[in-house]
């Protein structure tokens, strides 16, 4: 532990001290990026899929989605177990539960999220989160034809769903404003009775708050997330052979690590109005991606968000993300982006948030209406 005198020297900042702090954080970000790049180079010796477990990158909570996922430095509620587990230490309630529902592709696919966060003691917090992205009632026509005759009564249905459980823990450190946390992820994916997969991964995060400044770093899938697939297709061998399809074999998917860096600043306008802008940078090191910044060393996907609040009661949000290079009808290269907006309010310990993603259809991504709620519970004195 630092002595009170050392703490006082460290946290009494002048202009040049702030500049030194920014340079130190910048160097730390560079070292983290180099570390992850080295990890990826080692991982590329194995067969990997660049976009494995993408359902885990959709988001959690309409408040964050309204800011285009620019959230890891600010988050301090039950959704922190998903975004940045270090943010759990700033939980404002002893117990907080959260839930979200969203639909995609004309409601064909549904995305559900639920979480509960709880204070363990004065310096540590835990949470449990659950996510499901699935498409239900898919017609199964593999038995449609029997003995050369079409029989519609033989059509059944199945679901294709991705599930994930997150178990998170966070703790405040000895340095004021600094906290760290981690999440263990258990993944279960199922495609009817045909195939299923189990996976496991780890996320680590840190948050640092000094006065109005917010800094954060999150390492997703830091040890690489493995998903082992097994297939149960013996009963369909004849159908696959007749249609010229090859039976898939058991395999392993691996999601490589990614690094997310963020910073934000809290402005106070007059007495009751607050403005908080944040920028997040998603860094991947698995080759070129269709992102705003793309190179053989790293691809950088930026997210910019803005939160406006009134008396910590009403909230308006907006953000830009999903920057991509696309070709228009004439073949000309253009840069597209996804604008999001959102709003929310708080009544006592109840929070309601709404987000509309891809406002104005500016991006090739599908738009969606997202609703989420949170509720806090405190012990009676």
Image (tube, helix red, strand yellow):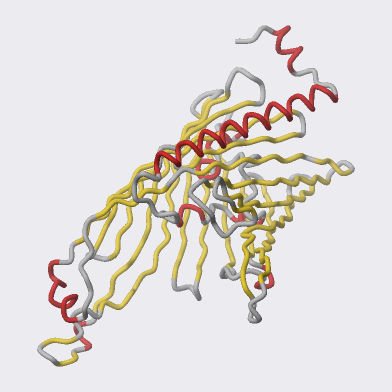
Residue 136 % position (x, y): 36, 70
- Quarter the N terminus occupies: top right
What residue do we see at 25% from left, 80% from top?
Answer: 141
Residue 93 visible in the current orientation = no
Q: Residue furthest right?
A: 270
Residue at the extreme left of the image, as rendered: 147
**Viewer-nearest residue: 93 or 332:** 332
Q: Measuring from the top left, give residue 121's x and y in whole percent.
A: 51, 24
Residue at the far front: name it: 296
The relative height of residue 272 versus residue 335 in the rendered view (above or below) is above
Percent position of residue 47, x then y: 34, 50
Q: Is residue 328 above or below residue 46?
A: below
Please tell me which residue lies in front, 41 or 48. 41
Q: Residue 157's spot in the image, x, y percent?
A: 28, 75
Q: Relative to 165, is 32 on the left or the right?
A: right
Residue nearest the viewer, comparing 240 with 120: 240
Give left or right: position of 285 versus 242: right
Instruction: Give the residue drawn at x 69%, y 61%.
Output: 341
* Residue 269 shown left or right of residue 5 in the figure: right
Total marks shown come to 0
């Amino acid at each position: 532990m630092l002595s009170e005198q050392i703490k006082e020297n460290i946290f009494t900042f002048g202009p040049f001290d702030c500049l030194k702090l920014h340079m130190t954080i910048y160097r730390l970000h560079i070292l983290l990026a180099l570390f992850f790049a080295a990890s990826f180079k080692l991982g590329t010796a194995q067969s990997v899929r660049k976009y494995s477990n993408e359902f885990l990158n959709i988001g959690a909570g309409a408040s964050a989605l309204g800011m285009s996922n620019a959230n890891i430095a600010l988050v301090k509620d039950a959704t922190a177990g998903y975004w940045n587990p270090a943010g759990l230490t700033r939980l404002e309630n002893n117990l907080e539960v959260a839930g979200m529902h969203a639909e995609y592709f004309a409601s064909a696919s549904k995305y559900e999220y639920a979480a509960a966060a709880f204070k363990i003691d004065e310096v540590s917090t835990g949470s449990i989160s659950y996510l499901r992205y699935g498409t239900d009632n898919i017609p199964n026509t593999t038995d449609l034809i029997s003995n050369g005759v079409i029989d519609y009564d033989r059509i059944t249905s199945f679901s294709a769903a991705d599930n994930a459980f997150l178990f998170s823990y966070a703790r405040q450190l000895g340095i004021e404003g600094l906290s760290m946390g981690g999440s263990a992820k258990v993944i279960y994916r199922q495609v009817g009775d045909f195939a299923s997969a189990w996976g496991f991964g780890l996320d680590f995060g840190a948050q640092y708050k000094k006065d109005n400044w917010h800094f954060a770093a999150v390492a997703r899938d830091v040890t690489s997330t493995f998903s082992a697939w097994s297939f149960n297709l013996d009963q369909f061998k004849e159908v696959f052979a007749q249609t010229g399809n090859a039976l898939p074999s058991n395999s392993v998917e691996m999601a490589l690590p990614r690094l997310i860096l963020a910073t934000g600043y809290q402005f106070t306008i007059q007495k009751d109005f607050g403005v908080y802008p944040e920028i997040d940078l998603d860094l991947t090191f698995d080759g070129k991606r269709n992102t705003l910044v793309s190179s053989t060393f790293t691809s950088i996907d930026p997210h910019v968000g803005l939160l406006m609040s009134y008396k910590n009661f009403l909230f308006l949000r907006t953000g830009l993300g999903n920057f991509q290079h696309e070709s228009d009808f004439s073949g000309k290269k253009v840069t597209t982006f996804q604008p999001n907006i959102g709003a929310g309010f708080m009544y006592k310990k109840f929070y309601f948030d709404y987000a509309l993603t891809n406002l104005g259809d500016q991006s090739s991504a599908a738009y969606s209406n997202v609703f989420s709620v949170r509720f806090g519970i405190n012990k009676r004195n």
